[in-house]
């Protein structure tokens, strides 16, 4: 969470140092990293975790999965160029180096997880976030004029070589085949793809339908008003999953909902108070002009905070059939929201409420299936 906090602080530093067009490019770059981190291995990373195993000091992986992972590692960043090709600051070299490096880092991260070397796995996964933060601070204080995105990509390439060492050293081919391999993979592909779309899709929609400036503003406000709630959401999901593996108690769950909602409101009030006290010295926020946008973001943050609790329930008790049904319902709600937006017009606020309705639907489904 500390490294995530560093990552969240990047935007507030960046916008004070650079002009809006450069910040917009930076926002797209960070979004690209997020998408690749989540879906860059096309769900094969989940198959890797599920089907591979440790033997002595090696990780055994079946042959077809070994090749599938490297295919996804190479091809996904190439495909992703289509969504980021219209920004001249994000040239092909930067994006490809970044995408391939992130994929290698995530592959190595999961390798170390399977080796049960959790400390190094987390260090490898999160070190680039801390590095980015330190670079921006250094550039800000020392007035360095180097191209930041090139600098970021160089750091990622360096970390990727460290990760590649782990892959070459510890990954070994296993000749055994997993039963129902493709059926299992398809379920991971759909689920991870949906979660990635829900996590980043609205940003690309805002960029394509409203414009790059609107995207930059949304990304910046997202960092300030949603990011603190996201940290709590991640902690809730991580901590509560272990509890829900033991039992599902409706009274306890309702109590936890009240607690995290109260925490969410408290964080919201503190955030607004910080913005008021700052009064434009550090944060570029107009509370009066953008009050409806800020309210919509806080509403989304509270919905996602509650969803973090129910996501832990799904992770602990979720059945394959329910997961499929949840994904189908999610796709239907996404399509309905797109239809509504196309009919009545795209706006940042409308897109935020559409995203809120999707997370609310997923929360309601999990509550109905496992808590009610």
Image: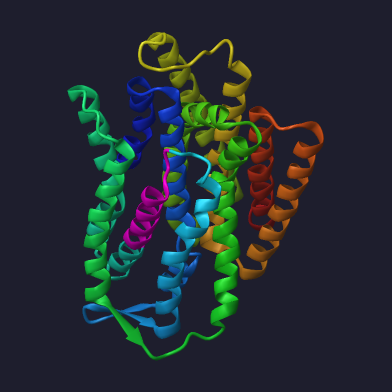
Instruction: Check the image and report above or below for 67 versus 311.
Output: below
Residue 197 in the image, given as x and y percentages of width and height? 58, 50
Residue at coordinates 26% horizontally, 63% vertically from top-left?
A: 163
Residue at coordinates 64% horizontally, 31% vertically from top-left?
A: 210
Q: Is residue 246 magenta?
A: no
> Which residue occupies the extreme right position in the image?
343
Instruction: Check the image and report above or below for 344 versus 312.
Output: above
Q: Quadrant of residue 150?
A: top left
Most foreground residue, 151 or 243: 151
Residue 367 in the image, given as x and y percentages of width and height? 65, 51
Residue 185 in the image, given as x and y percentages of width and height? 55, 73
Q: In which quadrant of the rendered image does the N terminus lie?
A: top left
- The answer to whether residue 243 shows anywhere in this view is no
Residue 79 in the image, given as x and y percentages of width and height? 52, 58
> Which residue occupies the extreme left position in the image?
142
Most foreground residue, 94 or 127: 94
Residue at coordinates 50% horizontally, 29% vertically from top-left?
A: 216
Q: Quadrant of residue 102?
A: bottom left
Q: Is residue 100 magenta?
A: yes
Left or right: 167 in relation to 364: left
Left or right: 284 in relation to 308: left
Q: Quadrant of residue 201?
A: top right
Q: Which residues are magenta?
A: 89-106
Q: Magenta: predominant secondary structure element? A: helix
> Which residue occupies the extreme bottom position in the image?
175
Model colouring: rainbow
Residue at coordinates 46% horizontally, 72% vertically from top-left?
A: 47
Instruction: Check the image and report above or below for 33 versus 113.
Output: above
- The answer to whether residue 197 shows anywhere in this view is yes
- Count of numbered tags: 0
């Amino acid at each position: 969470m500390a490294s995530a906090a560093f990552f969240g602080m990047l935007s507030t530093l960046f916008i004070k140092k650079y002009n809006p067009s450069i910040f917009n490019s930076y926002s797209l770059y960070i979004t690209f990293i997020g998408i690749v981190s989540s879906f860059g291995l096309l769900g094969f990373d989940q198959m890797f975790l599920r089907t591979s195993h440790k033997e002595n000091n090696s990780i055994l992986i079946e042959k077809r999965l070994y090749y599938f992972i490297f295919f996804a590692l190479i091809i996904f960043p190439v495909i992703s160029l289509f969504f980021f090709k219209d920004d001249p600051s994000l040239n092909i070299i930067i994006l490809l180096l970044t995408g391939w490096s992130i994929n290698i880092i995530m592959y190595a991260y999961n390798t170390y997880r399977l080796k049960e070397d959790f400390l190094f796995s987390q260090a490898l996964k999160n070190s680039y976030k801390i590095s980015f933060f330190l670079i921006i601070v250094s550039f800000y204080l020392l007035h360095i004029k180097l191209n930041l995105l090139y600098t970021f990509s160089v750091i990622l390439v360096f970390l990727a070589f460290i990760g590649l060492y782990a892959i070459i050293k510890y990954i070994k081919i296993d000749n055994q085949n997993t039963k129902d391999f493709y059926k299992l993979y398809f379920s991971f592909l759909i689920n991870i793809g949906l979660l990635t779309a829900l996590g980043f899709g609205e940003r690309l929609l805002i960029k394509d339908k409203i414009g790059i400036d609107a995207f930059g503003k949304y990304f910046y406000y997202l960092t300030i008003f949603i990011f603190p709630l996201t940290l709590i959401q991640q902690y809730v999901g991580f901590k509560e999953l272990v509890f829900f593996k033991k039992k599902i108690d409706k009274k306890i769950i309702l109590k936890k909902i009240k607690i995290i909602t109260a925490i969410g409101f408290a964080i919201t009030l503190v955030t607004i108070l910080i913005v008021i006290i700052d009064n434009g010295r550090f944060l570029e926020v107009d509370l009066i002009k953008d009050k409806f946008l800020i309210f919509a973001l806080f509403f989304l943050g509270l919905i996602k905070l509650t969803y973090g609790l129910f996501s832990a329930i799904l992770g602990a008790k979720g059945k394959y059939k329910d997961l499929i049904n949840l994904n189908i319902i999610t796709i239907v709600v996404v399509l309905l929201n797109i239809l509504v937006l196309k009919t009545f017009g795209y706006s940042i606020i409308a897109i935020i409420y559409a995203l809120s309705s999707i997370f609310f639907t997923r929360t309601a489904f999990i509550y109905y299936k496992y808590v009610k």
